[in-house]
Amino acid sequence: MRALMAIGLMAVLAVGVAAQAPATAPAELKVGDAAPDFNLQGTDGKTHKLSEYRGKKPIVLAWFPKAFTQGCTIECKSLAANGDKIKKFDVSYFMISVDPLEGEGGNLAFAKSENADFPLLSDPTKEVATMYGVLGPRGTANRWTFYIDKGGKISFIEKAVRPATSAEDMIAKLTDLKIPQAQ
């Protein structure tokens, strides 16, 4: 009798666990896929939407794990120090994380502390990070950079971003992708 009760309890638990299991994870994005649209607040006081750039200019989304951490600070400094070189290309670029916009540890304070001359975007709900497949097991974004063409398609995904040379690497990739110079 106990054996039957134990089997019954295990079956009920198995059904309960299966019912709580998340729906299948989104498929991993790859080159050629349409980049998921987003609607995120930036440190420049604007709301940025991918759909507003479609047909106008390519964009670069440099996902980073957490504001004020060592690697992210190095990456932000690299992009800020080389903004004049990146801005020679007809592209909009952003750093983006799941950090809040406001607050002591938020992207607004981080951008100001690093003199970022480009917008940092905040995805505190983690919805966009999930759509892009960058949300890591610790609940922060992986340090991946997405290059999105004028038509809204992913043209390259860099998953081995080197914070210290992120600007130089971005410039090299923009050149490789034949992104035109700004007018």
Image: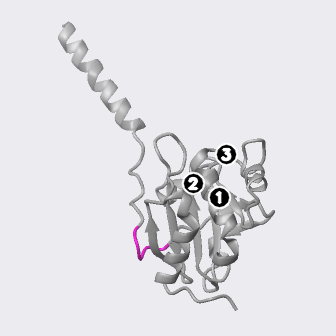
- The amino acid marked with disc number 2 is Phe
In the drawing, what numbered circle is on residue 76? Answer: 1
Magenta range is 30-34
| Res 59 quadrant in image | bottom right
Tally of numbered discs: 3
Mark 2 highlights which residue? 64
Q: Is residue 126 above or below residue 38?
A: above
In the drawing, what numbered circle is on residue 18? Answer: none
Which quadrant of the figure contains the C terminus?
bottom right
Answer yes or no: do the residues labelled 1 and 3 have beta carbons within 8 Å? Answer: no
With 135 as the anchor, is 119 left or right in this view?
right
Please tell me whether residue 24 belongs to the stretch shown in magenta.
no
Query: What type of secondary structure mainly makes up the magenta span?
Result: loop
Answer yes or no: do the residues labelled 2 and 1 have beta carbons within 8 Å? Answer: yes
Bin the neighbour count of mark 1 within 10 Å (Cα to Cα): few under 14, some 14-19, many 20 and up: many
Say which of 117 and 97 sits in front: 117
Furthest residue to the bottom?
A: 183
Say which of 66 and 86 sits in front: 86
Image coordinates of residue 63 in percent, x first then y, are 56, 58
At x 24%, y 14%, the residue is 6
Image coordinates of residue 126 in percent, x first then y, are 58, 50
Discs 2/1, front: 1
Element at label 2: loop
Mark 3 highlights which residue? 68
**N-terminal of the two: label 2 or label 1?**
2
